[in-house]
Every structure is written in structure tokens, then in C-alpha cells.
Image (cartoon, coloured by chain):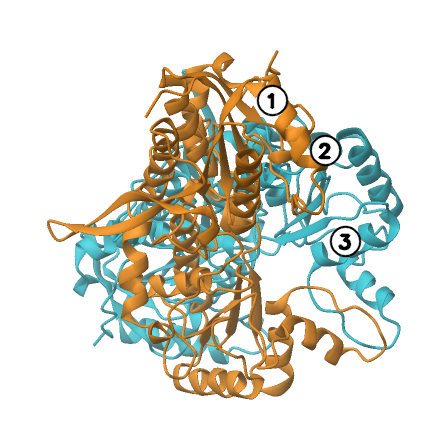
Chain colours: A orange, B cyan
Amino acid sequence: MEQLKGACILGQSGGPTAVINASAYGVIKAALDADCITAVYGAEHGIKGVLNDRLFDMGREDPKELELLRNTPSSELGSCRYKLAEPEVDDTDYRKIHEIFKKYNVRYFFYNGGNDSMDTCDKISRYMDKVGYECRVIGVPKTIDNDLFGTDHCPGFGSAAKYIATSTAEVYKDAHVYDTGMVTIIEIMGRHAGWLAAASSLASLSGCGPDLIYLPETNFVMDRFLEDVERVYKEKGNCLVAVSEGAHYENGLFVSEVQKSATDGFGHMQLGGLSVLLADVVKKNTGVKKVRDIELSLLQRCAAHMASKTDIDEAVLAGKAAVEAAVAGETGKMVAFERETVNDKYACRTKLVPLTSVANLEKKIPMDWITMEGNGVNQKYIEYALPLIQGEPERTTKYSLPRFAKLKKILAE
Amino acid sequence: MEQLKGACILGQSGGPTAVINASAYGVIKAALDADCITAVYGAEHGIKGVLNDRLFDMGREDPKELELLRNTPSSELGSCRYKLAEPEVDDTDYRKIHEIFKKYNVRYFFYNGGNDSMDTCDKISRYMDKVGYECRVIGVPKTIDNDLFGTDHCPGFGSAAKYIATSTAEVYKDAHVYDTGMVTIIEIMGRHAGWLAAASSLASLSGCGPDLIYLPETNFVMDRFLEDVERVYKEKGNCLVAVSEGAHYENGLFVSEVQKSATDGFGHMQLGGLSVLLADVVKKNTGVKKVRDIELSLLQRCAAHMASKTDIDEAVLAGKAAVEAAVAGETGKMVAFERETVNDKYACRTKLVPLTSVANLEKKIPMDWITMEGNGVNQKYIEYALPLIQGEPERTTKYSLPRFAKLKKILAE
């Protein structure tokens, strides 16, 4: 393969995670080290930064600050949720991107995100191919939701899972302190897949797991939920529930939406999320007096302080692998993970999958990992998820507070 | 002082914290080591365990498990919110307690809790004195709220403050990722004092502090709040707000309560807490489209994984000091902290204060630590709180998940 000389652009896209910057670090470091890559640009707010000609010169950053990206949550370059049109329908954006690529002689494009971002990546790859502009396009996976196709798991998931498991264990402790019983409902992210809510089950290894878990992989039945809660509460005098925000009825409607309209017939929008609503239903329909709802909200995706070292290392690895693949001539691919067992231990190696096989699809928890009753997960899930949360990262702190990366963000000339 | 030989009881009371078990460890360890203390009992669910004759023999626990109490959140012996009657009005409970004390020859009583618990402590002390039963009663302070009188600060506060500051910094990162602006409202515990909500200001040392902080020490004015938010949002394109759950109007009514009745005239109880309600008000009254509410809920008081080493060490110290004081002949006192500066560094020593001077009182943030506009705190608060969050504790984990203490809880014979 002949060497392709030119600049590269890295963009971050979609919802941030605790380790998306670790992948950025992997890309930036490997790209700065690659002889054929002449300049390394970070696009401000993902593809929008390309369209707006807002590119930061990563070569002018302090290497020590770049290294701190490993433990800096959220998308340091800025993110976006911008959907490119189909190039056949409207190629305005693509022509602009092409122009910018030519302006900076961009020959490598790395995009870090979830399934929507892989769609963006795929479209750009195909367009450049069509217009005969040589640019190698590689996607770097990212999503706390862990719902990307073609990869064993996604960077971002392990850290969120670890935060959820640890927080569930701690909340369990707190919720079991009084002799007067309590039902506690923890709402966890995941609109269409239950990987994150299921991670609460890992708290069982601390002896503090939830009693019931409801996932979007099964249909939610309100009466059965109430029966479950009452049964557990009767048996144990307490009940800890984990529920995916994406819990839905058989007809596909989200429980949160249906419940909102049901509880208020006067057209008033009920406030709060699913856990608030379910707590209200439990209060009204059971004898339980004390019901507490907890929404993990943004905390679960930005908690870099609880990141998994495995997740961070793999996130960096994914970024590095993307650069290596592109330099070696690959394009139109996403870096993916393959799980291996080496000396009886979990190991992870990277592979490449076509972007077209990933874009816009969603991977769910296999049904045989979910209990018959649809209110929990079994050992198969534990065995899958546990290796991904292992290890405590070295965190840089100042005054015992996080010391995040401070980038200069100097615009490219 | 003549040596008083007999058993001791330790009770945990009120809302749990990340380090209340560290104080328990301090008491148990020192009591087991004290020659004059013949047995060490842990009362199940605080004073209720005494009334119900449910005492666990701490001498039969594995010392290694006891040591794990240092990093086990919540009240391992169980807590209660049980208010003893005035002994002059109804002495039933006191007679029962006296009976149990005699049954086990209890001569030392340690009670770990907040201002209500110090009231319990004080009443028992006075009753035993009145009936001529020699028993030394010492209170051990505990509350994340930091609102106890007579002490520079309380065990439990430092760890909660550290969790709040770190989470605020992480949420700040997450909330600043898109180029479309957002208002984020974080609700923090504290009904009557703003120590915890103010701890969000420490995130400014990570460069990620909130723009606005509202505390119960000042009166909340909805119009001014909306003006503040709009001004910051206009200036920065983003606004991060921290608010005490105890934010109240000039007439003393909690904003959350008033707002609930205001938004729904049909007698429907609005669900959710203050942050949900304020987010709704911002949405309806400003041009801001994206408003997010986050309630830190129980997470902030049970997050042992984010505990401050200083807080843990001081919590142990408080427990130990209680035993030493009692053995030395003290009674009717609470252990308190005095802040010292040794070699230009923060140091903390214990002292004793009369229980009567502590019970049922609340300490608030001094008004000159709060900004003129009532929407933030100044450097004085930072200087006060920062030393209390210092240091990362050694955490025992298994599978990278918390390994909490497992007590056998064998009933006393």
C-alpha cells in the first residue's frame, strides 16, 4: 500500500461519555506520531466544525494536557447531533466538507460516536469515493448504551456500567438502613437497549443487587410490575428496582409517556421522568408508604471518577487502531472489539467492520440473558459485563478535585 | 477519676452518611481495646435496638470486617428516626432503657447522629442521672448537612461535599458539550442550611463551577432567579445552577411546595422535586429550550467511593475520642471538632461540648460568606470547605466493586 500523505481530522459526536476523550487521545497521539500524517486537527462540535471551518491544531497542544484527556469526561472538542442529508438528495454539506478537506489537504477522517455518527462517517466515505477524493474514513465506536452492532462492546459502556453498579450498591446500603421498609426505584439510561440498566445487577457481587430489573428488551406490564414489587416487599420488607428509561408497553409506547397522560386528564404535562412516575404508581396502588425515586441522569455518563481502567485503555486502543488502520490503507470501516480469552483471562483485540454494517442499527441484550419473568438478568450478563468494569485508573487531581485537560484550541491556519 | 467497669452500647441514628460507619469503627475499636469496657454492643436501629433488646456483640466480629466499616456507607447497625418523649411527660421508654442497661451492666452509651440524636442522647443522660444509674453518655456527631452547633464541621459533610463538587465538575463538562445552549439545574440536599449546595462551588477549582447557587440562608425570589439564569445564559450561552432543596420564599414556604400548588390548580399533586419544578419554570418563562434537572438524591450521602480521606479519618477520630472521654469520666457531652493551623496546614482536634448546647439547634452558613446577590458563595466558604474534602481513601474492592463490611450480628447473651 502506497503511503498517503496529508492531514487528519478527528470529530466527536453524539452524547458524551466518560472515555470519549480517551479515544480522542488515542487518535491524536497515534496521528501525531504517524509520519504520513502532516497535521492533526480536532473539529469543533463534530462535523459542524468541518462545515464551519473550525478546526483546532492538536499539534500545538501541550502533550501533558493531551494526556489528561484520558481522564477528562465529555467531548472536549465539543459534540453535535447533526444529521447529514442523503448525498443523492442534497449534497450541499458534502460539497462544503470536500472543500474543507481540499483546503487543508485532509486525507484522514476519524469520527468518534455511536450509530448515528457511523452513518455520518459512512456517508462521507461514500461521497469522497464518488467524487474521487482520496480520504480514508474510519469510525471509532463510542456509546454508554453499548448498542452498536459489530462489536463485542463499546468504549464508554464499561465506565458507565461501573458507575451504575457501584451507585446501586451504595444506594442499596442507604435504602436498607431503617426498620420501616422502603421501595426505591432507580432510573437508568437506555432508550432502546437495556445494557446499562442491567449493569445494576453487578452490584449483586457486592451483596447489594437490585431485586428487580426492567429492560426495553421485554414488554413492561404495569400489573406485573406492581405484583413483583409487592411480593418482594412482603418477603424482604424492602425492594430495590432498577428500570431502563426505555421501558415500554407491548404496543411500543414508552411507559413514561403513557403514564404521564394517564395521571393527569387536564392536559397538564406531568413533570419528571419514569422513576418519579413509577414511584407514584407504587404509592397509589400498594400499601407501601415510603417510595423513593432516583434518576442517575447525566451523572452516569460523565462520572470519570468512577471510570473503568479497562474501558479507558480500550478507548485509547480504539483510537490508536483507527489511525493505524487508516495509515495501512483501510477506509469505510469502524474499529470494533473482539473478546478473547488468554490464559483463562479476558482480553480484547480490535478488528475492522464495514461502516455500512453498523450504521443506524441497534444491538440488544440477548433474550436468553434475561430471566423468564422479564424482571432481571442471569449469570450470562454478569460474565459478559464484569470484565469491562475492571481496574481503577490513575486520576490526576488537584486539591482532591478532578484536574481535567485544558486545551488551548488554536485554530488551524 | 475512679474506673467505671461495664459494657457499652453504640447506636447509629438519623440519615446515613458515607462515614458514619467509620465513626462506629472508631467507637468499637477503642471500646474493645479499653480495659474497663467489658463488652461492646451495637444497638440494632439505634435507640430502638435498646428498647427491643436487640444488641449485637461486637466482640464476636472478625476484626478485618470491622475495619472495612471505614469504607462501608450507610448505618451498618441500622438507623432510626425515633423521638423519645420528654421524660417528665412519659418515662416508659426511659424505664425500659434503664432496665436494659441494668440487664447488660451498660455503663457507657455512645450515640452517633445529628441534632435530633443529640437530643436523644441528652435526655438519656439526664434520666440516668436522675435515677442515680451511673452511665456515661457521649454523643458522636454525624450529618452530611453540617448543621450541628458547637463543632467546626461534622463527620459526613466532607465526603458529601467532595461527591457534590466532583459530580458538579463532571456535569459541567457534560452540559457544555453542544453548541446549542442548555440550562442545567442540580438539586442538592439541605432543608435548612446550605452547606452542601454551597459545596458545588468547589468545582470552580476544577474550572467547572456552577454559575449560580441558591441556599436556604437567603430568601428565594423567583423573578430574580429567572433574571439571573437569563443573564448568564445570554452571556455564556449556557447556565449551570446549584440549588438547595430547602430554597424558600421570604414567607418561609419552600419553593418546591408553593410551586407544586401553583402549577396545578386541579388538586393534582405534581411529582418530582425542586429541580424538576424550577426547570419547568425556566422552560415556560425564558427563551431557553433545553433545560435539564438533576437531583443528586441519596447518591450524595452514600457515595463512599468518593469519600474524603480527611473525613474518614476524622470520623474514626470522633468515635475514638468519645470512648476516651467516657473512660476518663466525661458524660453528657458531644465530641466536637476544632480547626487548627499547624505549620500553615489545616489540622483538626477534638473537644467536648455539652449535649444541651447542641441538641435541636441548627448552624447555618455565615451571611458574609454568601454573595451580595444571594446567588453564590465567596472565597471564605471555599477556604472553609476545601480542607475537609482532601485525600483519597484506600478502598477495598472485589471485582472492582465495593467490598463492604459483612458483620455477623450475633445477638448479645
Q: Quadrant of the C terminus of chain A?
A: top right
Residue B195 percent coordinates (x, y) = 61, 42
In the rendered structure, the answer to whether residue B74 lies left or right of residue A83 reads left
Q: Sequence order check: which comes first, mark 2 or mark 3?
A: 3
Q: Which mark is residue B278?
A: 3
Which residue in the structure is indicated by mark 1?
A: A55
Label 3 sits on a secondary structure element that is: helix
Q: Nearer the viewer, mark 1 or mark 3?
A: 1
Q: CA distance from mark 1 to mark 2?
A: 41 Å
Secondary structure beneath dot 1 equals strand
Kind of residue indicated by mark 2:
Ile
Q: Nearer the viewer, residue A117 or A371?
A: A117
| Mark toward the viewer: 2 or 3 | 3
Tell me if I can see residue B301 in this picture.
yes
Label annotation for residue A215 = none
Q: Amino acid at mark 1?
A: Leu
* Residue ID for mark 2: B370
